[in-house]
Amino acid sequence: MRVNVKSSKNRHEIEKWIGIPYELMQFVQRNTYSLLIKGSAGTGKTTLSLTILRALKVKSNFFYISTRISPKQLFLYYPWLGKFIGRPKISESDEISGQSYNLSSFEDARLDEPESLFERITNQLMDVKAPIIIIDSWDAIASFMDKEARLNNERVLQIWRERAGAKLIFISEDPNDTTLDFLVDGIVELERKFYDNMPIRQIFLSKLRGIMINKPSYIYSLNDGIFRSYAAYQPDDFAIASSRVRFNKAESTLSSLSEGHYITSGYQELDDILGGGFIKKGVILIDMESNVNTGVAMAFLSSIMSNFIRTCNPILFHPFDGMGPEEVMSYLKLERDSNIYESRLIKIFCHIGKMEEKSDHNAEPSREYGPLDKHFEFFRDVIIKTKQEYPNKLLLNIMGTNIAQKMYRSRKINRRELLPFIRANTDLSLIVSRHSQSTRESLTEISDVHLRFLILNGSLFLQSLIPRRHLCAVLPYASTGSNRIKLDPVV
């Protein structure tokens, strides 16, 4: 069974699950082609070639020639490969030694002479109908040939490949070697680069005959030994219509929300980066670049809020980026089986001329409060009231820096007093900031965690600035096949 990208109604879903750039996937689905994968050592050339097999669901009728590592080592370095090939183990000792896997499609060519190896390749092309042959790497074979013999053999391989209706993938360790460039149908190059002192990986689609290359480069990851590239950021993927928080039945314990000194972020990948989650009593700065839609922050926050609601812990939510209460509730729409108690756990502030506290549409009507300079006093009163209403519960506070600026205008509080007050009276505070706002600098100095949403090479990522860690790609709802976004470590 092959994945038909052309007939897919959801390009992002295809890109997520197969891990290969959309244009490259269109190319490798052809009946016959030759593809050159270039890149320096450690860029993921072997991983990409194996992922192509996985994406095409090719479990047999392929021939993998390895001139660098043994086939047994491939199964050791890529644990998913054994499950993908689907060969059952014979015994426990065989599983450890790698003998349980079918190695007939893998050739250990580390000690082979170029002539005999070349003959074995041509035999595969003549004897097997429409095979996929991966030569990892061609440099090791070509280095033993003189220039004339190499060019002749490369032409012969192309002719036999076309006649056999086969797919031929060359892997090259020398990005500067252009000998094969004019012969092959496709060329992709893998590189390691640095962004803000962090290493990232980027694939360049240099040549794909017959394929329109709309996006010539993608950032990719080798997490879990699988090549996975990331599609272009589309704000519509985080639209309200796609955003639904599913609250499970309330639980009486905090075991799934809090452990030790940490509160889960709702994302295992982020918890691992932070060493266990958000620290209790912590102030978390979530920084968004100007070209990142507000829906991204709301989609990210929904998982955290879901955990609080599920464990019967209250939330104070201050709309940011000009959102109104109705828009917030659209993002936080409860499932049909949720009860009014769950709805009342979320208290939404609105600031339209006067101060209001608004809960879900099932709750009591909102009340009006004093003028804007009483903002902090009102906020303090709501915290006190909420803690009395939900004793022995964790209190989550979410606000934007625009709300913090309004509080600064209060006569009884300044910047140095606001965050210590929030830290002392809530269990976790998430402050959403726009990258361009001046308030961000003062907040960064006293934040326990600083996260940033940014667009890099057209794709959306989450960067941890405090503590300094690797990027995570942000996969939207359509790409995850669920009603929640997913964070994918870029390694």
Image (cartoon, rainbow, N blue to C red):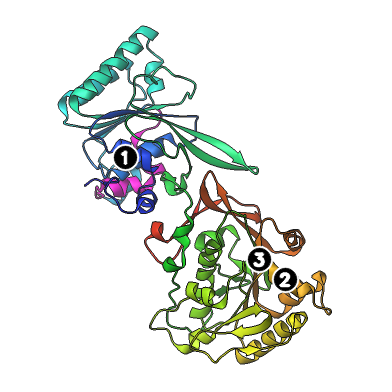
- Contact (Cβ within 8 Å) of mark 2 with mark 3: no
* Image position, residue 282 (x, y; %): 68, 70
* Image position, residue 113 (x, y; %): 33, 17
Magenta span: predominant SS is helix
Residue at (70% x, 82% y) in the render: 379
Residue 429's quadrant in the figure? bottom right
Q: Which residue is mark 2?
A: 404
Indicate the amino acid at tag 1: Gln
Q: Which residue is mark 3?
A: 284
Q: Nearer the viewer, residue 98 or 200?
A: 200
Indicate the amino acid at tag 3: Ile
Q: What segment is highlighted magenta in the picture?
A: 68-90
- Tell me if residue 73 can be seen: no
C-alpha separation, residue under disc 1 versus residue under disc 2 = 49 Å
Indicate the amino acid at tag 2: Ala
> Is residue 77 within the magenta segment?
yes
